[in-house]
């Protein structure tokens, strides 16, 4: 068994064990998640991601480990935008707090499956058509510039979501949450509840964000193991981040500007590779750390200034 196989096997065992532990100990059905519990879960998933970082360093060397850490950090910060939309979806469908954990779990597991498919297709395309990396780079530069100048508080209309419109048109829906069920009997007919709709919207919303984030990971590393693991660990941490940040999302109002600069930088990194210019991974890591930290601290400063502190 080669080093790559050992890395994949270790990742699979760690992931499966963590999910069983999370389901059995931290996510019992019907329970609400307190701030303390959310903090424990967040520490659990971040700690697990960092343990895998240490394993990669030991097994595959510092370069791959730093690429993984850079990609994970970027995906983790991008997930805060996911959470903002998740909060709007839960609010729009008036989901009860007792169902938050279960709905998020199912939605995020679906998102992981979709991301794996998305990444696999992306890797196959890039392997066959290397020039797509330069297209991805140009898209990231454009996305970053657009994101930098967009307003964080722009209103999102869930009712106009194309996936939601499709479900309303072609699926038998009910406005009930079904007491936590995904399907219920109404007038002798099976109908999908609002919780089913929310789960589908969570998964598809994550894929919309992945359209930007996955090409960005390609810009940081071409290693398949780095692309898969950084994405999966970041997505698995979404649920605990939701509970941790849902009451403080305004505290990160300017983080998107920091993320936008990162996307532009990664896009430029991909484009200059055409001229055989390679930017070292530690430079990428420093840019990501500075931009994300700067976005968070500036958001905090603006928030305190508004409150007159």
Image (cartoon, rainbow, N blue to C red):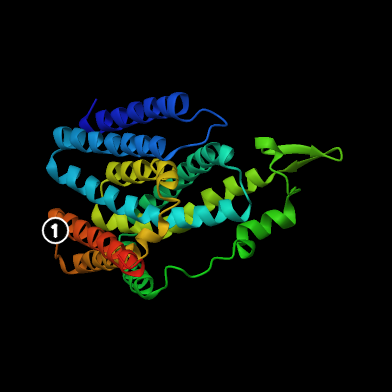
Front-lying residue, 230 or 51: 51
How many numbered marks, from 0 up?
Answer: 1
Q: Label 1, on which residue?
A: 283
Residue 273 quadrant: bottom left
Q: Position of residue 283 (x, y in %)?
A: 14, 58
User: Quick one: SS at disc 1?
Assistant: helix
* Residue at the image point whose x is 14% and y is 61% from the top: 279
Residue found at the very far right of the displayed protein:
187
In the depicted view, which residue is nearer to us: 208 or 41?
41
Specify the quadrant of the image occupied by residue 266: bottom left
Where's the C terminus, which quadrant?
A: bottom left
Q: Residues within 10 Å of mark 1 (few under 14, many from 20)?
A: few
Q: Determine if residue 134 is in view.
A: no
Q: Residue at x 40, y 45 (%)?
A: 244
Does residue 267 sit above or below 179 in this rendering? below
Q: Position of residue 202 (x, y in %)?
A: 53, 49
Is 304 drawn above or below residue 76 in the view shown?
below
- Extreme residue toward the front, this view: 308
Residue drawn at the location 33% of the way across and 28% of the way down: 14
Q: Is residue 276 above or below residue 36?
A: below
Left or right of residue 114: residue 135:
left
Find residue 17 and report its horizontal and vertical position in percent: 38, 25
Residue reaching furthest bottom?
149
Residue 265 appears left or right of 44 = left
Quarter of the image where the N terminus is located: top left
- The foreground one among 69 and 77 is 77
Is 193 above or below relative to 267? above
Whether residue 246 is visible here, answered yes or no, is yes
The percent coordinates of residue 179 (x first, y second) are 69, 36
């Amino acid at each position: 068994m080669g080093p790559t196989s050992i890395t994949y096997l270790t990742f699979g065992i760690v992931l499966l064990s963590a999910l069983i532990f999370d389901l059995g100990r931290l996510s019992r059905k019907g329970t609400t998640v307190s701030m303390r519990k959310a903090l424990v879960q967040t520490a659990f998933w971040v700690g697990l991601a960092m343990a895998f970082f240490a394993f990669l360093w030991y097994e595959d060397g510092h370069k791959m480990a730093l690429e993984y850490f850079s990609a994970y950090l970027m995906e983790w910060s991008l997930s805060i935008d996911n959470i903002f939309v998740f909060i709007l979806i839960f609010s729009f469908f008036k989901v009860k707090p007792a169902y938050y954990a279960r709905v998020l779990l199912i939605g995020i597991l679906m998102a992981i499956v979709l991301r794996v498919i998305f990444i696999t297709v992306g890797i196959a395309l890039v392997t066959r058509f290397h020039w797509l990396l330069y297209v991805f780079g140009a898209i990231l530069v454009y996305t970053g510039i657009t994101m930098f100048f967009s307003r964080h508080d722009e209103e999102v209309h869930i009712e106009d979501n194309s996936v939601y419109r499709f479900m309303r048109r072609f699926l038998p829906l009910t406005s009930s949450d079904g007491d936590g069920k995904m399907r219920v009997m109404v007038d002798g007919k099976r109908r999908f509840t609002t919780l089913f709709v929310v789960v589908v919207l969570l998964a598809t919303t994550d894929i919309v964000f992945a359209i930007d984030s996955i090409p960005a990971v390609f810009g940081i590393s071409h290693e398949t193991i780095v692309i898969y693991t950084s994405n999966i660990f970041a997505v698995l941490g979404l649920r605990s981040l939701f509970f941790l940040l849902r009451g403080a999302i305004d505290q990160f109002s300017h983080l998107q500007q920091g993320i936008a600069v990162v996307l532009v930088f990664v896009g430029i990194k991909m484009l200059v590779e055409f001229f055989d210019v390679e930017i070292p991974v530690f430079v990428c890591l420093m840019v990501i750390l500075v931009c994300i930290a700067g976005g968070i601290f500036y958001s905090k400063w603006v928030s305190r200034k508004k409150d007159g502190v």
